[in-house]
Amino acid sequence: MAIENTSAERIQELVEKQRAFFATGTTRNVQWRKQQLKAFKAGLQKWEKPLCDALWADLHKCYEEAYLTEIGLVYGEIGEAIRKVGRWARRKCKPTALVVMPSSSYIVREPLGCTLIVSPWNYPVQLLLNPLVGAISAGCTAILKPSPYVPTISTVLQQMIEDTFPEEYVGVVQGNRLVNGELFKHRYDLVFLTGSPSLGRIAMEAQAKYLTPMVLELGGKSPCIVDKDANLKLAARRIAWGKCLNSGQTCIAPDYLFLHEDIKDAFVEAFKQELAGLYPDGTENSDKFVHIVKESAFDRLTGYLADGKILAGGHCNKEKLWIEPTLLEGVSPDAPVMQEEIFGPIFPIMTFKDRSQVVNFVNGREKPLAFYYFGKGADGWDIIGQTTSGGACINDTIMHIANSYVPFGGVGNSGMGSYHSERSFLAFSHERSVIKTPTWLDLPVRYMPYKLFPFVKKVL
């Protein structure tokens, strides 16, 4: 199946339709938004099986993993938005400074307007639909652009959206990089993009002339540190799970291992054992192991195998787009596998003697989207305090994305802005300050010729 590019004329038509619809004010009504969220939930329920079938067809992603990492997370976001959108959208009364008395102060959360949401192929359902929850709850319209690299999923997503919403409210555009270029020519009130740093730069450059606000969820090389006093069995299991989830094709997957030299060999053995526990019959024929998305990605990943000595794994099958989870040692910091985000089940290993080596290495590179530390909690907090990343876990991997009560987002090269739960609502909203001043009193202190200035100065 191949995705057909949406024409430039069709994109122009969709942008104009959504601007006209937003101008009617329909989306500003909070009860109407709640109705759309309920329709969204019903649509997801109706299309859940076709979406899961498509995830299997394009990525070999089993139902359990599809639900846990894609569908279930969207249900959670929609459900919370239905329950709380009224509270999120309510006018907020704020304290008023003495100098502004007797006025009262408010924050009004209003929709930004017409938005564009661009999603990648690795979590094609979650990363397209979760931002849409924020757009709907905030009162925006949205043009959705799924990835052409997962054509079955992108087709089903379009069918679901067209079955659920009118296109002047939520519409879908399909196609390759040429379509991205056409999309970025138009003005939006927000661009929400999940993808590579290079695509983020292209979008920012194109939208700079409009000064468009952006939420960028990009990625990077997320370090995973295992210290000498870590629980190796537990660390190995959680790290193996985090790396094998979606076959490592996860923006917050642990990208490379930093092992304390005293436990390196013991960790490698523990990793092998825990991997065998996750996949007793191996990964090649497992229906619980996702495949690589396309041949070019497979070729790039297998090319990394020459960057070090294989300690475990290393087998692959191009016909199945399968790569065995692999540990590499003897890797140079300058090797390609240590320069590029891996996005696959390959783990380069570096060792350290003192945590300061880790701090210096991580801080000497682009800011990662995630940071993982295994060891004593106090030492974890210490190393987190000396580094930066979009998010972090102590004695775990991946799980910070599963908690909607904390923000998810990048920093520096790994992105800007954050979302999930109320932060998704805020990402698509403008917080407007409003001062309401009564007419029954008009204090002279602010007026020229400032006769009461000495008094005002003391108050300030």
Image (cartoon, helix red, strand yellow):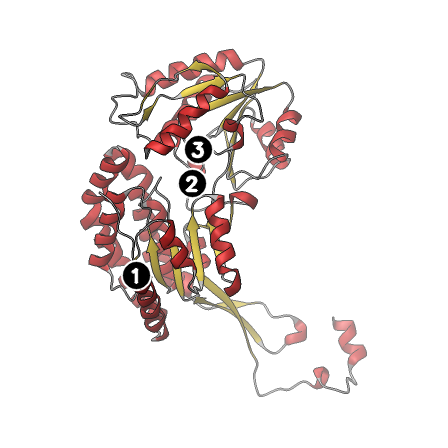
- Reading the image, the residue beneath label 3 is 253
Lower sequence index among marks 1 and 3: 1
Real-space CA distance between mark 2 and mark 3, rounded to the nearest whole angstrom? 11 Å
**Residue 356, located in which quarter of the rendered image?**
top right
Q: Which mark is residue 449?
A: none
Secondary structure state at the residue bearing disc 3: loop
Residue type of the residue flagged with mark 2:
Ile
Residue type of the residue flagged with mark 3:
Ala
Residue closest to the far right: 454
Asked if residue 29 shows in the view, the reply is no
Please rate how many residues cluster around mark 1, counting C-alpha atoms within 10 Å: few if below 14, some from 14 to 19, many from 20.
many
Is label 2 or label 3 in front? Answer: 3
Q: Nearer the viewer, residue 309 or 34?
A: 309
Please rate how many residues cluster around mark 3, counting C-alpha atoms within 10 Å: few if below 14, some from 14 to 19, many from 20.
many
* Above or below, comparing residue 83 to residue 287 in the picture: below
Q: Is residue 407 left or right of residue 440?
A: left
Whole-percent x, y for residue 53 in the image:
20, 39
- Reading the image, the residue beneath label 2 is 401
Whole-percent x, y for residue 94 in the image:
55, 67
- Reading the image, the residue beneath label 1 is 170
Q: Is residue 307 left or right of residue 164?
A: right
Q: Nearer the viewer, residue 126 or 407?
A: 126
CB-based contact (under 8 Å), mark 1 and mark 2: no
